[in-house]
């Protein structure tokens, strides 16, 4: 299995968790009631957060992961191809669940070599981005 390029210190993982939990509190989830928060550790060392924003037309819902990546893209001016070193995702109700398919592709686009942490009621799981989407679409 492919390994992540980056090693993340335990204290950094704890910081990402705190930011993800704070972001989760901002989620707009009137339909599913599942609040999701994400905290992204960028290549510049900063942390960017996002939350899910649901819509009555579910296809227009924005996932927390893509929200955090969008925030980072808007702030980071260099190294966008290697933007994501790690992303920590939490939810308020479910077992630890990995990102959806669309988020996996976007995470791969900006985080090849990174690590994805996802936590829920059943604990924490982690995967290298390459393990999360082993046959990613590439140009």
Image: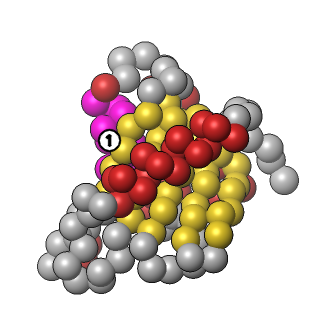
Q: Is 46 situated left or right of 124 in this image? A: left
Identify the residue at horizontal 56%, vertical 76% (top origin). Answer: 121
Is 73 included in the stretch rendered in magenta? yes
Which quarter of the figure has residue 47?
top left
Q: Is 94 situated left or right of 50 in this image? A: right
Assign the magenta stretch its main secondary structure. helix
Looking at this view, name the residue that lies furthest to the left. Answer: 56
Question: Residue 63: where, in percent of width, then height?
Answer: 35, 61
Question: Residue 14: where, in percent of width, then height?
Answer: 59, 45
Q: Is residue 18 visible?
A: yes
Q: Which residue is mark 1?
A: 70
Where 94 falls versus 23 (above or below)?
A: below
Q: Is residue 138 visible?
A: no
Is 15 included in the stretch rendered in magenta? no
Looking at this view, name the residue that lies furthest to the top. Answer: 78
Q: Which residues are magenta?
A: 66-74
Which quarter of the figure has residue 96?
bottom right
Mark 1 burial class by Cα count in 10 Å: few <14, some 14-19, many 20+: some
């Amino acid at each position: 299995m492919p390994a992540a390029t980056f090693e993340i210190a335990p204290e950094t993982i704890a910081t990402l968790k705190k930011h993800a939990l704070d972001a989760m509190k901002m989620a707009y989830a009137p339909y599913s009631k599942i609040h999701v928060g994400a905290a992204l550790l960028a290549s510049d060392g900063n942390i960017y957060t996002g939350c899910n924003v649901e819509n009555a037309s579910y296809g227009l819902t924005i996932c927390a992961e893509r929200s955090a990546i969008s925030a980072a893209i808007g702030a980071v001016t260099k190294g966008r191809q290697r933007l994501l070193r790690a992303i920590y995702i939490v939810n308020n109700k479910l077992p630890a669940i990995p990102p959806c398919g669309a988020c996996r592709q976007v995470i791969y686009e900006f985080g090849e070599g990174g690590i994805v942490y996802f936590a829920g009621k059943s604990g924490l799981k982690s995967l290298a981005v390459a393990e999360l989407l082993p046959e990613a679409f590439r140009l």
